[in-house]
Image (cartoon, rainbow, N blue to C red):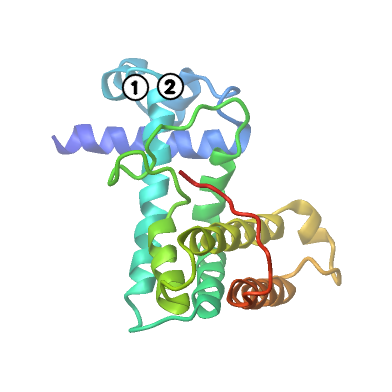
Amino acid sequence: MEKKETAKNRIIEASRALFSEVGFESTSVREIAKKASVNLASINYYFKSKKNLLAEIFLLNFKNFSDSLELLYKERESWSIEEFSLKVFELLDERKEEFYSAFQIFFNDGVSLPANLNGDQENYIGPPGGKTFKKIVDNDLGFEVEEWKREWIMRTLFNNIVWEFVVLQTNYAKVSEGSAINKEDSLKRIKNLCYCLVSGVRNQGINFSEVSYS
């Protein structure tokens, strides 16, 4: 059993590397087998197809990030939205190789995502760690703020945190010394966004356009 699990893990890790480096469509099963040091039959045995292999990697990446945010959540008795958002960005930065690879796979063109990404709640397709992030928003804002606004804040912050993180990993950021593409300014932008979003939903004079996530 241990050998089978080891072979399966090698296939997953080899696929993660190849899918992030050259893309899903450009990666052949033969290349995966070579990098994982297994035969082609092993890939078919464990996953049946390259698409099934990709789906499992999506689920693993999703769960890994979700679990990381839940552990972060449990580090303190309470978090403000701003504190947690900045800490999520720091988490991404500390484990950049691991998480950037996962987002590279996610951004591949022409790849169908699994219908249910976290496997815990039927029909839930939210950002990884979204349920944990939503708890932070709920606790900070309180339930007097409409549900859709709390959901909107969580998703908006998640999208922007990931965007700031991903941009910092690009070659353009690495060669643009002295530009606004740096970690310090990313943290400032996230902090400013938190302030604007929270202040906005608490201002009853602002007429927001409702967004549906059902």
Residue at which label 1 appears: 43
Secondary structure category for the residue under label 1: helix
In contact (CB < 8 Å): disc 1 and disc 2: yes
Looking at this view, is 13 or 165 the one in front? 165
Work out how far the residue at label 1 is from the one at label 2, CA to CA, in angstroms. 8 Å
Badge 2, how many Cα within 10 Å: few under 14, some, many 20+?
A: some
Q: Residue at x 49, y 75 (%)?
A: 84
Q: Answer above or below: position of 44 versus 206.
A: above
Tell me: 61 left or right of 45: right
Q: Amino acid at mark 1?
A: Ile
Q: Which residue is mark 2?
A: 50
Query: In the current view of this chain or complex, which residue is farthest to the left?
Result: 1
Q: Position of residue 169 (x, y in %)?
A: 67, 56
Secondary structure type for disc 2: helix
Query: Image height check: is 214 above or below 162?
Result: above
Horizontal side of residue 70 vs 214, given as left or right: left
Give amino acid for label 2. Lys
Say left or right for 120 vs 213: left
